[in-house]
């Protein structure tokens, strides 16, 4: 292989490596960043009411949310 | 009630505490392979809990066995429990462990007992919330579950691995495998957790919910993750996990129809995952012993327990569910 041909091949290899590296870097950035923005939200959360937890057995169960809440570790 | 709790980690200790000090269970035994941890936990719970250190007795003499063990360590104990005619409550949160527990269905039916699988925060509370939300609609079309946070170190390791493993989703009558860590979606959890980016992961909720809601066309689960979680998901954990995770949350979205109209139910809860899982598992154990499980066999909580009664029980113990009212895309 002549010196000129070898230089051309090396240039091709270098350009290929740069292209692959650039694509990988771009893919990594996109994967980490994700896409899209913050979706709209209107409304909020409220605790479930006792009647929402009253199933078919409610009368038999005699347990309501108004009972004293039993011991529970508080959220951190 | 005679209960055997296997595993004295962040969640197992909470289960034992719930059963012994709050429910006043007749006999609570606690097993762990680490003598120092076992001694510390049993000492903190007083005389109400009896510790069992290695070597364990091969015989299981309990009405219910609660498995709060790392993945892979519970299945043999579950088989032994079924052979002894005991109910089993498993806090398994890895996909493989849940599938292994579900495979005990035949043995459980033969023994006339139940194996309540995934009886923790997520899965567990998530399954009950889905069942409650599904009760509000005539037809369930889609179920989407999301979670934030972890309990003890074993839970954190499962969470870490879940991002690197393929996720499974039920879509139009078939299971699909999707890459873990893909499918970013901003999910709104109850305050103060609020909005978090959630991704697919190897989570067991779809497997547990599929049998309870066979007509749903889509069932998916996502987990909250940071950029670092996703970047390092395929690597071993770079540092040991915390003894216990911080505040966590779950959120379920059930899309269905009432009459001909489309309806979306969004329910959630916020708590420390290990604490809520302990309460959930204790409630499941109590339900199993009291004969409140729908039928013998192995299954998730959505198909095995009455969501109304169980969520009332949890609420009395401080684990309260919430409903999102309004409009949230994501």
Image: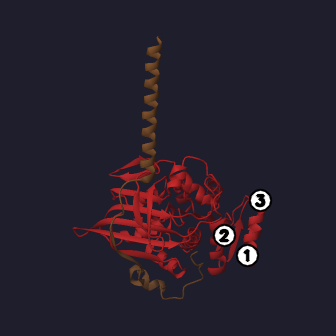
Chain colours: A brown, B red
Q: Position of residue B305 (x, y in %)?
A: 47, 70
- Alpha carbon of mark 2 to alpha carbon of mark 3: how far? 17 Å
Give the chain of mark 1. Answer: B
Disc 2 designates what residue? B13
Q: Please tell me which of labels 1 and 2 falls first in the chain.
A: 2
Q: Is residue B22 above or below residue B8?
A: below
- Whether residues under marks 3 and 1 lie with C-beta atoms below 8 angstroms apart, the answer is no
Subunit of label 2: B
The front one of B215 and B108 is B215
Q: Which residue is mark 3?
A: B54
The picture places residue B276, in percent across and down from the top left corner, at 55, 72
Pointer 3 indicates a residue of which chain?
B
Marks 3, 1 in one chain: yes
Residue B163 in sight here:
no
What is the C-alpha distance between the residues marked 1 and 2? 10 Å
Specify whether B32 is left or right of B150.
Answer: right
Crowding at dot 1, Cα within 10 Å, few <14 / some 14-19 / many 20+, comes out as few
């Amino acid at each position: 292989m002549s010196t000129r041909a070898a230089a051309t091949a090396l240039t091709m290899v270098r350009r290929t490596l740069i292209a692959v590296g650039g694509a990988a870097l771009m893919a990594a950035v996109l994967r980490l960043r994700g896409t899209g923005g913050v979706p709209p939200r209107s409304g909020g959360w409220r605790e479930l009411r006792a009647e929402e937890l009253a199933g078919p057995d409610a009368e038999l169960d005699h347990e309501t949310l108004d009972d004293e809440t039993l011991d529970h570790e508080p959220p951190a | 009630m005679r209960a055997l709790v296997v595993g004295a980690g962040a969640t197992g200790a909470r289960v034992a505490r719930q059963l012994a000090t709050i429910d006043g269970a007749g006999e609570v035994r606690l097993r762990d392979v680490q003598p120092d941890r076992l001694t510390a936990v049993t000492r903190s719970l007083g005389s109400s809990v009896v510790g069992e250190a290695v070597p364990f007795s091969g015989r299981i003499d309990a009405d219910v066995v609660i498995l709060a063990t790392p993945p892979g360590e519970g299945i043999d104990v579950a088989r032994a429990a079924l052979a002894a005619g005991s109910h089993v409550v498993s806090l398994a949160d890895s996909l493989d462990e849940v599938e292994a527990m579900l495979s005990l269905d035949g043995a459980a039916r033969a023994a006339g007992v139940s194996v309540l699988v995934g009886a923790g925060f997520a899965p567990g509370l998530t399954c009950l919330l889905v069942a409650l939300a599904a009760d509000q609609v005539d037809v369930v079309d889609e179920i989407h579950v999301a979670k934030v946070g972890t309990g003890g170190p074993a839970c954190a390791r499962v969470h870490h691995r879940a991002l690197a493993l393929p996720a499974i989703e039920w879509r139009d009558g078939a299971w699909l495998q999707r890459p873990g860590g893909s499918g970013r979606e901003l999910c709104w959890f109850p305050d103060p957790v609020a909005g978090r980016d959630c991704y697919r992961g190897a989570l067991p909720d779809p497997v547990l919910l599929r049998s309870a809601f066979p007509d749903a066309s889509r069932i998916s689960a996502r987990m909250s993750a940071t950029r670092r979680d996703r970047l390092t998901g395929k690597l071993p954990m770079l540092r040991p996990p915390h003894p216990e995770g911080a505040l966590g949350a779950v959120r379920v979205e059930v899309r269905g129809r009432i009459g001909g109209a489309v309806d979306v139910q969004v329910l959630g809860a916020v708590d420390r995952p290990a604490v809520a899982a302990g309460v959930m598992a204790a409630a499941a154990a109590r339900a199993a012993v009291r004969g409140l499980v729908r039928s013998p066999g192995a299954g998730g909580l959505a198909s095995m327990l009455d969501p109304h009664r169980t969520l009332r029980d949890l609420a009395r113990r401080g684990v309260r569910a919430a409903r999102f009212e309004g409009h949230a895309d994501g």
